[in-house]
Image (cartoon, rainbow, N blue to C red):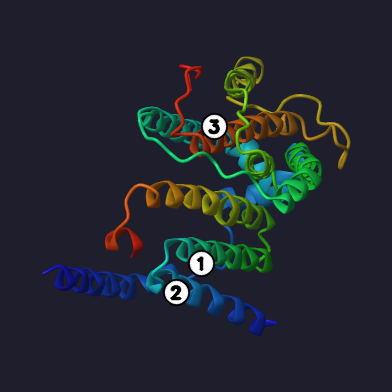
Amino acid sequence: MKPLFSLVMLALLATLSLRLAPLLQPGEELGQVAAHYASQGLVDNRGSNLVTSVVVNYRGFDTLGEVVVLFLSVTGIGFVLRRRQGLVLPAPVPASELVRTGSYLLLAPVLLFGAYIFIHGHLTPGGGFQGGAVVASAVLMMLLANRDRHLPHGLLSWIESLSGFAYVLVGFVGLFAAGSFLANRVPLGQWGDLFSAGLIPVIYVLIGLKVGTELSALLDQMTHSAEPEVKREGSR
Amino acid sequence: MILIDIFVGAIMLAAAAAAMWVRNLVSAVILVGVVSLAASFIFLRLGAPDVAMTEAAIGSALSTVIFLIVVRRTESHEKGPEVQR
């Protein structure tokens, strides 16, 4: 019964794809909105990175939604993992000399690289999400090297909440000062400078901090999930 | 140059198929990470460095590690043919 069902589903999917495939030809030219973004994106926001210009400015509200989705999923994982405290695990095996030395050697450069990615989000490829993920991998290396280390969850949730709050605040400042949510109406600065492109670097630093702390807290919770912890923040 | 793309795409397909067939969960997780890494390379070749960075950082680094943590946790509790598949 089960293989038959899978085969029927596969056949349905194949016919559907075959029917839809001719409709999915790439367009010859950009649509009106896309053409405006492509031609005006670098002029409107004076960043060197068109992708960032679209993601953070024109579609800043959607990015806020993405951040909220990430926040909710991490909160859900925290909620689920907190319930499994009765499990008894063997004590963590201490990390080997190689892992420890390598992690301590790489920790600072990787952390710096993550910060660089989200601070330079408007100039170079990458941005808050990518930088935050790189920061989280640095934190992961630290956790792997030192197995019984715990991250300060209170501090992490403060940073995370404050940066999320500041993102919304920046949006409302745009709403009241310039008439639209997240409007980029501050002095734009010189092309290619670190302090340019208006609010984009501000928002990307906030997103970077938020994503980095969120993912770090998630990794910490996952690596220590089964150990009984008395002091755990109720908000996470 | 298109040979490189075909080669990396073949690696992707092979790793994805192997991830389904392999019996060891840890190997399967690593193979899924290989798929992500090859995908990020292809994104880079298509001129989307932003997406490539996301795929490399999230897909092949963080989610692989999270899966590995989960595999270790679950294996240490439930041992049986169902888990090892």
Q: Amino acid at mark 2?
A: Ala
For marks 1 and 3, give the CA distance.
33 Å
- Contact between labelled residues 3 and 1, with CB atoms less than 8 Å apart: no
- Contact between labelled residues 3 and 2, with CB atoms less than 8 Å apart: no
> Label 2 is found on which chain of the structure?
B
Q: Nearer the viewer, mark 1 or mark 3?
A: 1
| Circle 1 crowding by C-alpha within 10 Å: few under 14, some 14–19, many from 20 | many
> Label 3 is found on which chain of the structure?
A
Rendered view: B80 above or below A58: below
Residue B18's label in the rendered image is 2
Q: Earlier in the sequence, mark 1 or mark 2?
A: 2
Rendered view: B74 above or below B25: above
Percent x, y for residue A26?
51, 68
Q: Which residue is mark 3?
A: A64
Q: Residues at marks 2 and 3, common chain?
A: no
Residue A145 occupies quadrant: top right
Q: Amino acid at mark 3?
A: Leu
Q: What's the residue at 28%, 63% (across, down)? A: B81
Q: Name the one closer to the observer, A100 or B71.
A: A100
Query: Element at badge 1?
Result: helix
Percent x, y for residue A211?
60, 35
> Label 1 is found on which chain of the structure?
B
Q: Is B24 on the left-hand or right-hand side of A209?
A: left
| Circle 2 crowding by C-alpha within 10 Å: few under 14, some 14–19, many from 20 | some
Percent x, y for residue A215?
57, 37
Q: Which residue is mark 1?
A: B31
Query: Element at badge 3?
Result: helix
Q: Is B23 on the left-hand or right-hand side of A51?
A: left
Q: Residues at marks 1 and 2, common chain?
A: yes
For marks 2 and 3, give the CA distance.
37 Å
